[in-house]
Amino acid sequence: MAFWVDAGTGFHIGILNVFHVPFIASSLDLSLRLEYRYFTGDYIPAYFNSFYEIQKFSYPYKNESTGREDTIPKRQVLQLLGDHGLNGYYAELILNFFGYFTIGASYDDYDGPYNSNLRIFIDFSALSFIQLGCYYYRHNYEGADQALAFDDKSLFLGEARVQITSFLYLVGQYWRIWQLVQNSESGQYEYEPVNDWSVGLGISYTF
């Protein structure tokens, strides 16, 4: 059970299983997590997350009385939900292939619209001199056909690290971020998704 001070409460119950399938020199590892969740109206799990800088100003909300769909500040959504609780579930699956690479995904869904969240990642570490990673997050979408859409509800990061010396590495990244721009017609400021990339040097030392 989790709660915010002077706010709502969330109830989580589920199972976590870890399976090891041994082979000659390594093992295939599988982690599975399933949860049922219930939240009171003024509780949002992971309130401060990767999307918070966007959601604090623009959070998807559907007015049940009027049927209108809109985006409003995240804190205002909590106030509008009132005592209306949410039922839902969370599922997570992580598969490690003999220490060479790892694939993982998690999905949660709750009552009402815009309550589906998907996270997928792949880490490749088979070679000591290079590491590859790819991460995709999609939050607050509606409908299975929208799970892999690439729009303003999506985050993406691709990264490659090449070890040059024991402490110096070359890193390249491609990502999708948001930029605050002024709408030329309304004059209001809005977030727009932009794609960017970078190449640089990094230093890592373990004491």
Image (cartoon, grey):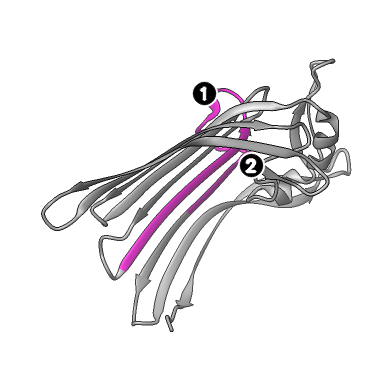
- Relative depth, front residue between 10 and 29: 10
The local crowd at label 1, few if under 14, some if 14 to 19, many if 20 or more residues have their Cα within 10 Å, is few
Q: Position of residue 154 (x, y in %)?
A: 58, 41
Mark 2 Cα-neighbour bin, 10 Å: few <14, some 14–19, many ≥20: few
| Disc ID at residue 145 | 1
Percent position of residue 194, x then y: 62, 49
Amino acid on which disc 1 is placed: Asp
* Quadrant in which the N terminus is drawn: top right
Of badges 2 and 1, nearer the viewer stands: 2
Task: Name the one closer to the observer, 83 or 73.
Answer: 83
Q: CA distance from mark 2 to mark 1?
A: 32 Å
Q: Position of residue 123 (x, y in %)?
A: 37, 54
Label 2's element? loop
**Which residue range is magenta in the image?**
130-157
Q: Residue at x 42, y 80 (%)?
A: 206
In this view, 16 is above or below 141: below
Q: Residue furthest right?
A: 187
Relative depth, front residue between 191 and 95: 95
* The C terminus lies in quadrant: bottom left
Q: Mark 2 or 1 closer to N-term?
A: 2
Report the amino acid beneath label 2: Met
The disc label shown at residue 1, or none: 2
The answer to whether the residue labelled 2 contacts the one labelled 1, judged by CB atoms less than 8 Å apart, is no
Residue 81 magenta-drawn? no
Residue 159 placement: quadrant: bottom left
